Structures are given as C-alpha cells and as structure tokens.
Amino acid sequence: MANIRDVAKLSGHSVSTVSRALNHSGYVSAATRQEILVAVKQLDYHRNDIALALSTGKTHQIGVIIPFVNRPYFQKLTAAITAEAFEQGYQVTLLPTNYQPERERQYLAMLKHHLLDGLIFLSRSLPFSELVDFRDYGPIVCCEDTFDYPLASVFTNRGESFVHAFQLLKQCGFRHIGVTVSRDEHHSQSAKLTLQAYKMVYGPQLDPVLIYRHTCRMTDGIAAAQQFMAADDQLEIIFANDDEIAAGAQRELQQQGHGALVIGQENIPVSFLMDYSTIDHRLTEMGTTAFKLLFQPEIMKQAISSELILRGRLKKIVAQQQAKSRS
C-alpha cells in the first residue's frame, strides 16, 4: 500500500508539500498540485484519516446523543444538525441512549478519548453537573436551558409558551383539560414546565387522573384520550407533548364521537394534515444553532421563540373570543 512518502518520491516534491496539497492547508502552486495528483492516481494512494486525526487532533465527526431515533421531535432536530454539519464538512454519529445514564457516560468517554470533536445532547438523563466534568475534553451543547451551568445551550422558552397557550384556553372558557407528558416531572424539564404552567394559569394542580405520563408514540395518545374521557365526561382539551401523540388522541376522540380538541407540539406535517393546533418550538432553527454553538470560542446560551399555531375549530373559537373582546 502506497504512503505519502511514495507520493513525494514519485512526484518529485517534499513530504510537507504533498501534505499541504492533499490537506489544502497551505499554498501550493497549481502545477505542483497537478503533479502530486497524478502521482496519487498512479499509486492509488488513499489518505489515512485515522493518522490525520491523530496528527491534527480533529476527527471532523460529532456525536448527537439522542434518547430515541424514532420520535418526530428528535428526528427533526437531528435532520437540522446533520444538514448544517454536512455543509461544514463534518460527519454525524447518532448515539441512542433510551435515557440510560450509563450509555450517556460511554459516549462522554468517546469525547474524552478524542474520538469525537464535540457532543450535542438532544435530551439527557445525567445531571448537568456531570456533563460539566467533560468540558475539558471537547465542546458540549445541550438542546435545553442549562441555567447557570457552564454548558452551551440552545432552547425555546417552553414555560412561557405553555403559559401563553393555557391563558388563551382559559380566556376562551375551557376548563376541562387533560395533559400528556413524555416523562415524569422529576426527570423532564418539559413535563415540569407544562404542569407548572397549568397551575399558574388555572390555580389548583391538575388532577392526577388527567395527566398521562411516559407518552412516546401515537398509541399512547389513544390510551391517554381513553383515560381522560373516562375521568372527565366534560373533557374539552387534550394538551399533548408532541404532534404524534396529539394525532393518536384526536383519532380516538373522533372514533368515539367526542368533541374535545387537541393541541400538539413541534408542527410536524401530521398536525397540518389533521388540522389541529400545535406549538412550534422551531426545531430546525434549534438544530442548526446547536451545531454552530459547538465551535464558538465562548460558552453561549441562545433562546429561540416558540409560536402557537392555531388551526381548525380552536382557531375559530379564539378568533370569535378576540372579536368579542374588541367590541
């Protein structure tokens, strides 16, 4: 197998010149570059990327820690990160965890051993304090608010968007609401913020029977709708933790001839096709920003605004209520 010295000998140029030409790392005249490329072709030379990574300290690979690869929320974030990484000449390795702390520690060890140039956490089970210990080995970005911890982050103000949504529902006279969350509120910021927002707007805590936890797929939305209908015969709204859950809930409500409305999150195509309202947390912008923050010289925290997108019957109800308020 040919090596860089063979290329240098055949082309008649030094090893350092060949290295600059192949790595585009310095000036090489067009004529010299062409002579080197001819030698490369004749020798069928292939660069040793592992050796290059060892010499430069760069793998041009980042890791994306993703709890589940089959959830629309994580898929949308991952797609945006991958697109931006591709534009910048980086490869992306998906690192699924199923929220297992030991898996996350294994991936952090990859950063420690310089197998990756950086890590992006889409969601996590480990505490921020443990992630901070690995910052010396490479950049880490979290797709959630990291508060006062010295960790870069990009996030939407979910608490604010949830309060806004519940306030709008209350103004329209809705009182009977069921809520789904992805995990319990002790492990999920989003779940905690959802239930806090409800209490802030409506006063008392939500009845536990009107909370459906650990919802992660469409069938959970169906089960949640069944639980809520049985628990409250005046059910008016199901506030779901993502659009796939909302789609399952709406399907079940329609099957039962029930008039309750659903609100989803993330603005994926199914919410448009099924014409229900959703909170757009701008995941594409979040993913693009997460990659860019990896290579900033300073730790940055960037907030991105959410948007409540009203559709279907709820949009009409809100418009009528606003028109009444103005008159």
Image (cartoon, rainbow, N blue to C red):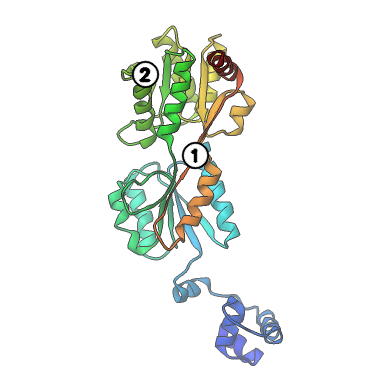
Residue sitting at the far front = 327
State the mark number for residue 200. Answer: none
State the mark number for residue 202. Answer: 2
Instruction: Choose top left, top right, bottom left or bottom right for residue 271.
Output: top right
Q: Nearer the viewer, residue 292 or 256?
A: 292
Query: Residue 33: x and y, percent?
Result: 67, 83
Q: Which residue in the structure is indicated by mark 1?
A: 305
The residue at the point 35 percent across, 16 percent down is: 209
Q: Is residue 213 above or below residue 207?
A: below
Query: Residue 62: x and y, percent?
Result: 48, 58
Question: Looking at the image, do the residues carrying marks 2 and 1 touch, with CB atoms under 8 Å apart?
Answer: no
Q: Is residue 231 left or right of residue 48?
A: left
Helix, strand or loop at mark 1 = loop
The residue at the point 46 percent across, 16 percent down is: 171
Quarter holding the C terminus?
top right
Q: Is residue 310 above or below residue 20?
A: above
Q: Amino acid at mark 2?
A: Tyr
Query: Residue 155: x and y, percent?
Result: 44, 43
Q: Is residue 151 left or right of residue 81?
A: left
Task: Answer with mark 2 or mark 1, whichever residue precedes in sequence.
Answer: 2
